[in-house]
Amino acid sequence: MAAATLGLPHRAAAEMVEAVLTKKRPPVIWLHFQECTGCTESLLRTTHPSLAELLLELISLDYHETLLAAAGHQAEAALQASMAAHAGQYICVVEGAIPTAANGAYCMIGGRTALEMLKDVGSKAAAVVAIGSCASWGGIPSAAPNPTGATGVPMIFADDPALKDKPVVTLPGCPANPYNLLSTVLNFLTWGKLPALDDLGRPKFAYGQTIHENCPRRPHFDAGRFAEKFGDDGHKAGYCLYKLGCKGPETYANCSYQHFNEVPGAWPIGVGHPCFGCTESKVGFTKPLHDTADVLRVLPPDQAPPVNPKGGEGADGFALGAAGLALGALAGAGVATAVRMRRAEDIVDGDPPSGGGAS
Ligand code: SF4
């Protein structure tokens, strides 16, 4: 699953399995700041792997305020113990924005501000992963007028000379797709480096294409068939949601083929709602819902299922989901991922292999 998410061939999947079976589980310290815990909730609902497999076999989750059995002083002691034992080796995952107004007083844990905790834990990490839009750039807490001065991990690190060279991966999304986190961590475990990133710190395997490029409703867009308002015949038939404000054409993410929690069609457009643009700081929580999107990449889609404009069958996320299920363990990855894997086969045929890491 992780290799498919990364768009890597079978050989890379075998290397990942070898790494999981033979290497020490990477320690992970997970910090919660200004957020709704939606990214954790999404992670809790993964089934391949299950949460138990994830925690007991793939990673060592040493600190996570939602999942820890310990509380209070014991929880903070677990954090300090993990940092001391694994300095320079652990992955720090940050969920939530960091408030900077009033010296960070709007979010305090164990007597420390989120700002202090991030700088302390982040400075000793091998790498930092900002999961979700809040940690990536501020997300909902940073929406105007932003009274708490909420911002993201990259902004804090860029302003601090001691932290500006620390590798930071951003996985924006509201919530972020847990498979993008899992694939990033396994990439790190297998090849000792992070996957290739774009200029916003997002892994290219997940954020290299717009949703519009792989959307199952794309044939309707190309044919000029649009839902004009919620509940009309076009909406019921699964037509394109562009006129309802869909931001898919200006949103880089893999939601259209990497659905959430292996439920076919479990993503906004799959259930008939326009993409909100939650992975883009200049779109999600910023651009009005009803505004039409800028079409950034006028390219033909990688792949699209046949469309039945009358019956609506096959005109929503279920079509791609069904194709994904047919691939067994690749459930949810879908046809578009298979196309990307073939492309990756060419890229990865060398040494160092598969991870494609840049940083
Ligand atoms: Fe593009 Fe959105 Fe229409 Fe899909 S529903 S084809 S992403 S505009």
Image: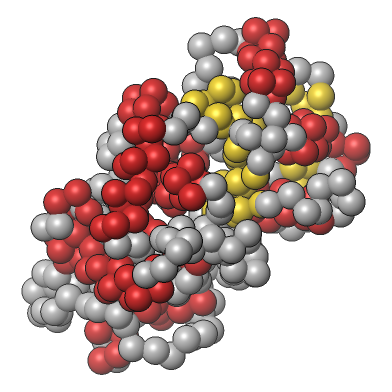
- Residue drawn at x 73%, y 54% is 154
In the displayed structure, 25 sits above or below 272; it is above
In which quadrant of the rendered view does residue 341 lie?
bottom left
- For residue 197, side relative to residue 18 (left or right): right
Percent position of residue 273, x then y: 36, 63
In the displayed structure, 156 sits above or below 52; it is below
Q: Furthest-front residue in view?
A: 351
- Whether residue 232 is visible, yes or no, is no
In which quadrant of the rendered view does residue 63 lie?
top right
- Whether residue 75 is visible, yes or no, is yes
- For residue 47, side relative to residue 162 (left or right): left
Q: Quadrant of the C terminus?
A: bottom right
- For residue 319, side relative to residue 147 (left or right): left
- Residue drawn at x 22%, y 78% is 304
Color style of the picture:
secondary structure
Q: Nearer the viewer, residue 311 or 5?
A: 5
Percent position of residue 55, x then y: 41, 26
In the displayed structure, 198 sits above or below 114; it is below
Q: Nearer the viewer, residue 155 or 278?
A: 155
Numbered marks: total:
0
- Residue drawn at x 45%, y 74% is 210
In the displayed structure, 259 sits above or below 57; it is below
Q: Nearer the viewer, residue 55 or 246?
A: 55
Q: Nearer the viewer, residue 80 or 296?
A: 80
In which quadrant of the rendered view does residue 74 lie?
top right
- Residue drawn at x 65%, y 26% is 86
Percent position of residue 269, x then y: 34, 64
- For residue 2, side relative to residue 81 (left or right): left
